[in-house]
């Protein structure tokens, strides 16, 4: 590829928004340059603004094109790297995957607030504010339904790895951090996501960052 790819991220230990498009980019196998902006520094806001017109990260630069927002980045990577099959060929599975990714992108505010991503942390029992268990139950049911309809081809939500898994990967880390009890099928899905080489790479970087 002649045009360079750069992805701009926030904390690997704490930023669920950054993990999603990074995982998709890793899955493409394309070479890229990664820039991580440290949080809570005097110049953090200015460094983010230099890279994203929204004042938020992640963002992806591809040559002269800038894409911001994790969902938009994922869809762009699907278009640019069709061989990576970030969405399945089957139209029904693709629509299902987009629906559940969008639900994660726009929802689960209580889980986000009370169980923030902390990849290297161990916080069992924390975060169980009113309403959080209902959101956890919705996620578990969402996973079960996706696997029942489209999961025959592998261990992921649509069988083979897809953008849907990118959007629930941060949830998988949360369920480990907060020691959430899950039914066997949901636990097997979490284990499959966390066993991905890319997820192991992210977790190792998060551990270094959190020291």
Image (cartoon, helix red, strand yellow):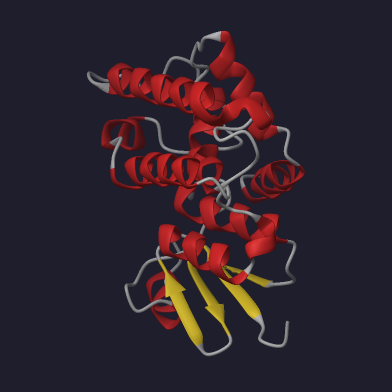
- Residue at 70% across / 50% down in the picture? 205
Give the image quarter of residue 195: top right
Asked whether residue 208 appears in the rendered view, the answer is yes
For the N terminus, the image quarter is bottom right
Compare residues 199 and 205 and report the one nearer the observer. 199
- Residue at 58% across / 37% down in the picture? 119
The single residue placed furthest to the left in the displayed view is 130
Along the horizontal axis of the image, is 126 left or right of 211? left
Along the horizontal axis of the image, is 61 left or right of 98? right
Asked whether residue 43 appears in the rendered view, the answer is no
206 over 119 or under it: above or below:
below
Residue 115 lies, in percent from the top left, at: 39, 31
65 over 156 or under it: above or below:
below
86 over 130 or under it: above or below:
below
Along the horizontal axis of the image, is 199 left or right of 144? right
- Residue at 64% across / 46% down in the picture? 206
Residue 86 lies, in percent from the top left, at: 59, 53
68 over 92 or under it: above or below:
below
Residue 66 lies, in percent from the top left, at: 46, 80
Compare residues 69 and 56 and report the one nearer the observer. 69
Residue 194 lies, in percent from the top left, at: 67, 33
């Amino acid at each position: 590829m002649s045009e360079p790819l750069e992805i701009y991220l926030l904390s690997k230990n704490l930023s669920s928004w950054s993990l999603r498009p990074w995982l998709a980019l890793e899955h493409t196998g394309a070479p890229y340059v990664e820039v991580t902006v440290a949080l809570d520094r005097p110049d953090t806001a200015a460094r983010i603004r230099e890279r994203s017109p929204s004042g938020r990260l992640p963002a992806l630069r591809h040559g002269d094109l800038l894409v911001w927002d994790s969902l938009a980045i994922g869809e762009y990577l699907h278009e640019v790297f069709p061989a990576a099959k970030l969405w399945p060929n089957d139209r029904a599975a693709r629509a299902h995957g987009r629906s559940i990714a969008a639900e994660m992108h726009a929802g689960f505010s209580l889980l986000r607030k009370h169980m923030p991503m902390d990849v290297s942390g161990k916080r069992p029992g924390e975060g169980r504010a009113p309403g959080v268990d209902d959101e956890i139950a919705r996620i578990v049911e969402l996973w079960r339904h996706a696997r029942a309809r489209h999961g025959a081809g592998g261990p992921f939500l649509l069988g083979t790895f897809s953008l849907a898994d990118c959007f629930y990967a941060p949830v998988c880390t949360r369920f480990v951090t907060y020691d959430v009890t899950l039914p066997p099928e949901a636990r097997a899905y979490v284990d499959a996501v966390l066993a991905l080489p890319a997820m192991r790479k992210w977790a190792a970087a998060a551990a270094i960052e959190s020291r």
